[in-house]
Amino acid sequence: MKAFLLIAALWLGLFFAPELLFAKEEVDPIRLSAEASDIRLDYRLSYLIDYSDTLELDAILAKQDLFRFTPTLPSGLVFGYEPHPVWLKLTLAPSHDNTHWLLQIPAPFLEFVDFYQVVDSVRVEFKTGYYLPHDTRPVRYSGFAFPVKTSATPSTIYLRVSGTSPKTFPVLLTKKENFEEEVLYDHVGYGIFFGILCAMFLYNLMIYISLRLKTYLLYIGTLLCTILIFVSASGYGGMLLWPDNPEFNYYFGRLTLSFFAPLLAWFAIEFLEVKRHYLWLYYFLLLLMAAGVLSFLLMATSWVPSFGNNLVALTASTLIVTGILTRIKNQKSATFFIAAWSIYLVGGVMLTLRNAGVLEFNFYTTHLAEIGAACETVLIALALADRYRLLKEENERAQQLALTVQQEANEKLEIQVAERTEQLSLAIEELNATLQKNQLQTRVIEYKNSELDAFFYGVSHDLKSPLSSLFSLTQVAKEDVKDAKGQEYFSLQLEQIARIDRILKDLVLLAKLDHGNIPRQKVEFDTLVQACMQSVSNQPHFSKITFDIHIETDIDYHAEWIFVNTILQNLVENAVKYSGSLNPCVWITIGQDATHVFVTVKDNGLGIHEEYLSKIFDLFFRATQASTGSGLGLYILNKSVKRLSGQVKVKSEINVGSEFTITLPKEYTPFDTAQLLQE
């Protein structure tokens, strides 16, 4: 039973308190000599964690019995994301060696590092760090290096490491010549690494400018984030690019991770067409993109400083799973994608485990992330090229198919064009025959119209003289006859003679409408209106009508006078004839603008029924039984307006009156006889 308890206690001590097994009271002093090689100090230091965050060196030196340092464990300096400052103590044995030694910490991400060496009661100190200007470092180096003095008496070195960055790092004592050689190798290695990243960035930028594909733009974004993160994390940004602005280390080294993970997820969505294959995986990647915002807040406030690294590790793992699942769906480009992120993930996971204190600080845990990033960059570029090749092949197949379809369509179209051309030729022949027939008919119509003109003129001439004689004889007879009944008969006869005279004049005017060449002259609207009023002054109630006339001065209008006169004569005559019996009034308004002349004649007479308004311009139409006209007046008016390329508008209301508005363009095309004949 005692043996069992002893073994159990031993195992508990091994897993839960290894320092109880391996700790020593004191750490042996380090002896430096010219023959000694570089010394790894991780296991030969003692440490003290300052849980008060206020401990200073003076207090440690004054109360060494109170502040006792604990020797480091065999695992080395593995403190993970310890939030409190860590003090390290190193004792150097007396030495007469003149070799230049440096205390080297190849961990550029340590936020604040204070170095103290107490030699013969003299203190040498340097205060520097990731978030301090680079000129605070005594040695120009991407990490931290401090000169160590040797003395004939023992000396003590104290290091204070603070901040929220991971506190897992090695400490070495290095000869100056070895240090310089190592730094040279670092420069060459990182030069190759950043050269690959920059070359890939510029190469894919040129491709994006040429192709304008979104996937290339997203990939360029991930490359830019990768460059910024590693430039900052490696310490070269603070050493070479912004030595006096250490805050850029924070912006580019930490906060860029918040943009890096969402860009990776977005790139995977577009490149692998995730939404088309797996909707649930698409939404999970969107969730990772949203987590980038949370990462920014948690890291900016220092609540969870490691959240960005963890998010990138989770995203990289998800991308590998995404690549495998889409490859199952026959997404060929996913092969490169899986290989790229597998290498990157291994390096990233090792870096994360090292920062958390699970793995020790060595070449593989430190630089496999850079190696994985370089391989990932090249492989993703190859994947994009392969994707573009596949898209190009698909486009070529689609173009070939489209070309085949187009050729077939062209062949069909050529057949249809040939058939249509033959039909069109037959139609043209029929049209030419019809045109010849129409031309012949037009000549016949023109000949008949010329005969009709001659007939109208002949009738007008032959009837005008007898009609005038009949009118004169009837007037004389009316004056001689004293009988009232006879007087009435003669008055009726005079009215019929006047009506016949008007009909003859209208027929002659209709004949003139068919003549295409009538000289134009300036129209004097004042004189024309007065003449029209004078011609109707013999109407029985003319003297009772009130005329309101407004004619704009300086109206410059040239037209065929006879048709303008016909328009005004008909409008004035109808307005006078059908004006009201009670307070009759006629309004005549003539105006102009830059391009048109406007003629408006309005009366307060009988009016026209709305149902007749569309018919009043028809030949021989009379809107009321009270009309004594021939039915030619408004028909001739409408033809005259059209002859002058104008428009006529009518507004009328029973027992309220009628209003006619004529719009005449100042410039109008020559008279088209064929069109008027057609109408």
Image (tube, rainbow, N blue to C red):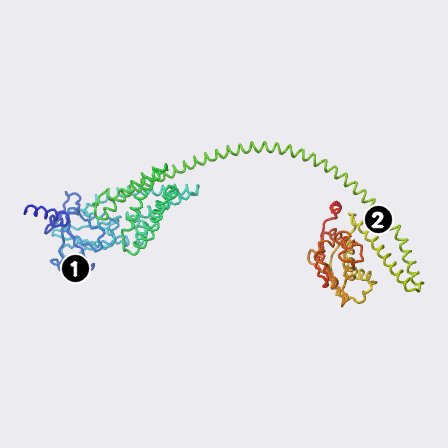
Q: Which mark is residue 456?
A: 2
- The foreground one among 98 and 312 is 312
Where's residue 289, x and y in %? 35, 49
- Three-letter code, disc 1: Asp
Tell me where residue 351 sits by quadrant. Answer: top left
Nearer to us of marks 1 and 2 is 2
Residue found at the far left of this picture: 2
Q: Position of residue 305 (x, y in %)?
A: 27, 53
Number of other residues with Cα within 10 Å of mark 2, as a class: few under 14, some 14 to 19, many 20 or more? many
Label located before the other in sequence (1 or 2)? 1
- Above-or-below relation of 300 to 280: below
Residue 380 visible within the image:
yes
Question: What residue does disc 1 label?
Answer: 58
Q: Is residue 185 left or right of residue 634?
A: left
Relative image position of residue 102 (x, y in whole percent): 20, 48
The amino acid type found where label 2 is placed reads Phe
528 lies left or right of 421: right
Q: Residues within 10 Å of mark 1 (few under 14, many from 20)?
A: few
Q: Could you tell me if the residues under marks 1 and 2 are in contact, i.e. CB atoms within 8 Å?
A: no
Which type of secondary structure does the marked residue at label 1 adopt? helix
Image: 36 above or below 59: above
Pick the residue in front: 506 or 69: 506
- Left or right relative to 155: residue 431: right
In depth, the one of 556 and 653 nearer the eye is 653
Tell me, for residue 325, which label it has, or none.
none
How many numbered circles does the render carry?
2
Q: Position of residue 237 (x, y in %)?
A: 31, 49
Which element is circle 2 on? helix
Image: 144 above or below 376:
below
